[in-house]
Amino acid sequence: MLFDPRPKERREEIFDREKELESILNGMNEYPISLIIGIRRVGKSSLLKVALNEYSGIGIYMDTRRLYSAGSGSISSAMLVDEITRILLGKGRVGFLRGIKVEEINLLGLHLKPRESTWVDVLDRLEQFGRKTGKKVVIAFDEAQYLRFFGSRGGKDFLAGVAYAYDSLPNISFVFTGSEVGLLHDFVGIDDYSSPLYGRISEEIEIRAFPRELSEEFLRRGFAEVGVKVPEDEIRRAVDELDGIPGWLVEFGFNYWKKGSFEKAIETTMNRAKAMIKEELFELEKRSPRYALILKAISIGLSRWSQIKDYVEAKGGPITNARLNSLLVNLEKMGWIKKENGRYHIIDPVVEKVIKED
């Protein structure tokens, strides 16, 4: 169902993403490393889960945000080994296993002791596992930029394990998704000489928001599925408010279906958006309170660098040019803003509206 608010796991639940889905499956089959990028709530997790369910080999899915949260801001090797072991035994808290049964795992003797095993030990065992079953293994990390909190060297030990598998373990490949696109690129470091993965070949698939026509058609299809007739002008108004980001369109469609009113659906969707975005902003402000000031400035139309600087200094005190530049670059890397023709804008219009009205 298109309006199911949970991440999708089957192809028939996905709307107009055939090309992207086939690209992800091709990446899993042909490349040792694949990156799936796109802004928040655009549908990366759903596409990844659908692809893993259709993958011909063995797929292991992990949500690294949950690992990061469970580790109170850090991810240890023991924690990662423990979670992979749980997934393989059908007890995973942050992921799932596809392509093989738990009984087969037990028969093949894949035994890991989290306190005694390392990330590289896991990879070696999974390579042996792949050879025994005659299947390749894909390990997928959703929101993988959080892996920079793995260990004490900014995730370098994790990446060293990936580089080892890339060079020596042909039955293993990796998929990384990221909403903080620049941070994911920086973390993986394909183009960074200091990264263990420097120069490695990878596939990159970008998931974009729907254009207006597809956004309207998505809502029409979703309402048809649940047997609700919605006036065309309300569909157009919804897209005016929410743009083409599937996560918000699903929220609106679900709420309209349940509440039977455009106004109530928009209100409920925006209230939900406010709660989610404020939580994200709270985490952002932990890094620097000036991030919120910059976003506020841009949301009220102060889109040029000099205007942003004036606003930030008026509200938060003096800031050097270098520091402001650094914060703007970070916001771009984290997928909050984009610079075009010398002006900054907030990528997600719902985020912009929430910040502007706050």
Image (cartoon, rainbow, N blue to C red):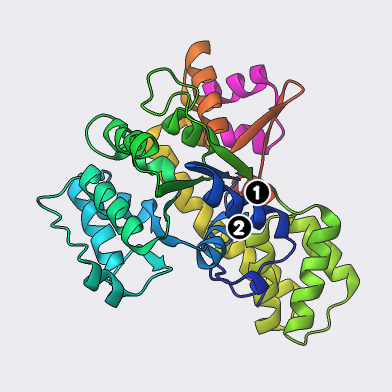
Magenta stretch: residue 296 in it? yes
In-front residue for pair 279/9: 9
Classify residue 99 as left or right of residue 80: right
Task: Kindly identify the residue that appears in the image at 62 percent across and 44 percent down.
Answer: 205
In-front residue for pair 220/64: 64
Give the magenta-colored segment's residue range: 293-314
Residue 295, compared with residue 104, is above or below; it is: above
Which label number is shown at residue 43?
2
Query: Where does residue 83 sit, x and y in percent of width and height?
Result: 26, 59
Query: Where does residue 15 sit, x and y in percent of width and height?
Result: 72, 66
Q: Describe the element under mark 1 as helix, strand or loop.
A: loop
The overriding secondary structure of the stretch rendered in magenta is helix
Task: Kindly identify the residue that appears in the image at 35 percent across and 38 percent down.
Answer: 162
Residue 298, compared with residue 246, is above or below; it is: above
Which sits earlier in the primary sequence, circle 1 or circle 2?
Answer: 2
* Residue where numbered disc 1 is placed: 207
User: Looking at the rendering, in which quadrant would you find the N terminus?
Assistant: bottom right
Q: Describe the element under mark 2 as helix, strand or loop.
A: loop
Q: Is residue 100 visible?
A: yes
Q: Dot 2, how many residues are within 10 Å of its Cα: few (below 14), some (14-19), or many (20+)?
A: many
Magenta stretch: residue 60 in it? no
Q: Seen from this angle, which residue lies furthest right?
A: 232
Q: Dot 1, how many residues are within 10 Å of its Cα: few (below 14), some (14-19), or many (20+)?
A: some
Q: Quadrant of residue 60?
A: bottom left
Q: What residue type is labelled 2?
A: Gly
Number of labels in the image equals 2
Q: Quadrant of residue 302?
A: top right
Mark 1–mark 2 CB contact (< 8 Å): yes
